[in-house]
C-alpha cells in the first residue's frame, strides 16, 4: 500500500482528502476469528456441491433445441413466402396462406414465451446468488 | 542459527506458506491468514457499508470465499491483491442484493454552520457527513473512492482491486470528487480556516 509519485493522481488535495484518508481503524470483534474458523471447519466437512446432471439433462436439452430449431425452420419456411407476397396495398390472402401465417405466428409466440421464461429464470437464479 | 528453506519461505511470505499448508489439507493454517487479514478486510467492508455488524458478516463471507477459492490464487499476484479483489466482489454483489439504507447525495446532511465549526464535535460531524455522502454516490463512483482511501491513496492498488485500468479509476475518482465538492462547497474554506486556527493556537 505504498504510494509513489507516479501513482499520485492529478487531482488537487482539498479538505475531502484528509477526512476520507484519516479514518480510525475498526478492530474486529474478539469472536471474529473464531467465528470465521468455525465456518471454515463446517465448510471443510460439508459434502461437495452436487454437480449439474449434464448427462441426464442432455437428451432433454437436445430435444428442446431440436423442437426450437424445427419451429424456427417452419417459421422461416412458412413466413418468407407470405412476407414476400405482402405488398403496400392490403393483400388478399388465400386460405392456405392465412393458415401458414397463423402457424408462423403461433411459432413466433411460442419462441417469445420461451425466451421470456428463460430470461425470468436467469433473473431469479441470479437473485438467489446461484449464478 | 540457520533456517531451513521452508522456514525461510514462511518468514518471507507467510500467506504463501499458509496457503500451501491449507491446500495440503491443514485447515488450521487458514487461521494465520484470517489473523493477518481480518483487520484490513473488516475495515474495507466497513467503508462499503458503515455498519459494524454487517461489515463483519461481509468480511466473514469474503474469508469463506477465499477459503473455497484458495486454489485459484495465481501466485504471480500478491496474496493481498487477490484477497482484496475477491473481497471487493463479495461486498459489491452483496450490497447490490441488499443495499444499505442511504439517502441521495443531494439529501446528505449539510456540514455544521459557522457558529460551531471550530469545535471538535462539529469537525467530527462534518467528517461523518462526508463519509456518509460517499455511500450516497452512484455505485460506479462510490467504489473507487472507498478503495482509493482504503489503499492509502494508492491509485494503482485501488485499480488492481477493482480490476480497472488506472486511467478509468482516475476518471471515476475525479468525477466522484466533483460530486462531493458540489455537495459540500463550504468544506474547503472551513478546512483552511480550521488549519489557521490550529496554527494560531499552536496545536
Image (spheres, rainbow, N blue to C red):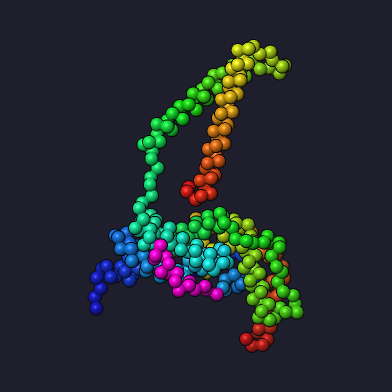
Give residue B129's position: percent from left, percent from top. Answer: 66, 69
Q: Answer above or below: position of A57 versus B168.
A: above
Could you say which quadrant of the image residue A15 lies in? bottom right
Q: Nearer the viewer, residue A25 or B95?
A: B95
Is A23 colored magenta in this rendering?
A: no
The C terminus of chain B, quarter of image: bottom right
The N terminus of chain B, quarter of image: bottom left
Q: Nearer the viewer, residue A41 or B48?
A: A41
Give residue B153's position: percent from left, percent from top. Answer: 54, 67
Q: Answer above or below: position of A9 versus A125.
A: below
Q: Nearer the viewer, residue B102 or A87?
A: B102
Residue name at image x 61 percent, y 20 percent: A102
> In this image, B118 relative to B58: left or right?
right
Residue name at image x 66 percent, y 77 percent: B123
> In this image, B155 relative to B78: left or right?
right
Q: Is residue B74 visible?
A: no
Q: Is residue B134 visible?
A: yes
> In this image, B107 relative to B10: left or right?
right
Q: Which residues are magenta?
A: A24-39
Give residue B5's position: percent from left, percent from top. Answer: 26, 68
Give residue B138's position: percent from left, percent from top. Answer: 63, 57
Residue name at image x 54 percent, y 19 percent: A77
Residue name at image x 36 percent, y 55 percent: A46
Q: Nearer the viewer, residue B158 or B28?
A: B28
Is A38 colored magenta in this rendering?
A: yes
Could you say which quadrant of the image residue A89 lies in? top right
Amino acid at each position: 500500500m505504498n504510494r509513489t509519485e507516479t501513482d499520485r493522481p492529478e487531482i488537487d488535495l482539498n479538505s475531502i482528502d484528509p477526512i476520507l484518508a484519516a479514518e480510525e481503524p475498526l478492530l474486529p470483534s474478539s469472536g471474529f476469528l473464531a467465528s470465521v474458523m468455525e465456518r471454515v471447519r463446517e465448510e471443510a466437512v460439508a459434502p461437495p456441491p452436487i454437480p449439474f446432471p449434464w448427462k441426464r439433462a442432455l437428451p432433454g436439452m437436445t430435444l428442446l433445441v431440436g423442437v426450437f430449431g424445427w419451429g424456427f425452420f417452419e417459421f422461416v419456411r412458412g413466413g418468407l413466402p407470405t412476407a414476400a407476397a405482402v405488398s403496400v396495398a392490403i393483400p388478399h390472402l388465400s386460405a392456405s396462406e392465412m393458415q401458414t401465417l397463423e402457424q408462423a405466428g403461433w411459432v413466433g409466440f411460442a419462441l417469445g414465451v420461451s425466451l421470456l421464461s428463460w430470461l425470468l429464470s436467469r433473473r431469479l437464479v441470479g437473485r438467489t446468488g446461484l449464478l | 542459527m540457520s533456517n531451513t528453506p521452508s522456514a525461510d519461505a514462511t518468514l518471507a511470505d507467510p500467506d504463501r506458506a499458509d496457503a500451501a499448508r491449507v491446500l495440503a489439507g491443514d485447515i488450521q493454517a487458514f487461521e494465520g491468514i484470517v489473523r493477518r487479514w481480518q483487520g484490513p478486510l473488516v475495515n474495507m467492508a466497513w467503508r462499503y457499508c458503515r455498519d459494524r455488524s454487517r461489515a463483519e458478516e461481509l468480511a466473514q463471507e469474503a474469508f469463506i470465499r477465499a477459503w473455497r477459492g484458495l486454489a485459484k490464487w495465481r501466485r504471480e499476484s500478491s496474496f493481498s491483491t487477490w484477497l482484496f479483489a475477491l473481497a471487493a466482489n463479495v461486498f459489491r454483489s452483496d450490497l447490490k442484493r441488499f443495499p444499505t439504507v442511504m439517502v441521495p447525495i443531494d439529501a446528505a446532511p449539510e456540514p455544521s454552520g459557522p457558529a460551531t465549526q471550530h469545535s471538535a464535535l462539529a469537525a467530527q460531524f462534518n467528517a461523518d457527513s462526508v463519509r456518509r455522502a460517499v455511500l450516497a454516490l452512484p455505485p460506479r463512483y462510490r467504489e473507487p473512492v472507498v478503495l482509493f482511501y482504503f489503499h492509502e491513496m494508492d491509485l494503482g492498488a485501488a485499480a488492481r482491486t477493482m480490476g480497472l485500468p488506472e486511467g478509468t479509476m482516475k476518471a471515476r475518482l475525479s468525477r466522484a470528487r466533483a460530486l462531493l465538492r458540489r455537495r459540500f462547497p463550504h468544506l474547503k474554506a472551513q478546512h483552511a480556516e480550521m488549519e489557521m486556527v490550529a496554527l494560531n493556537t499552536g496545536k
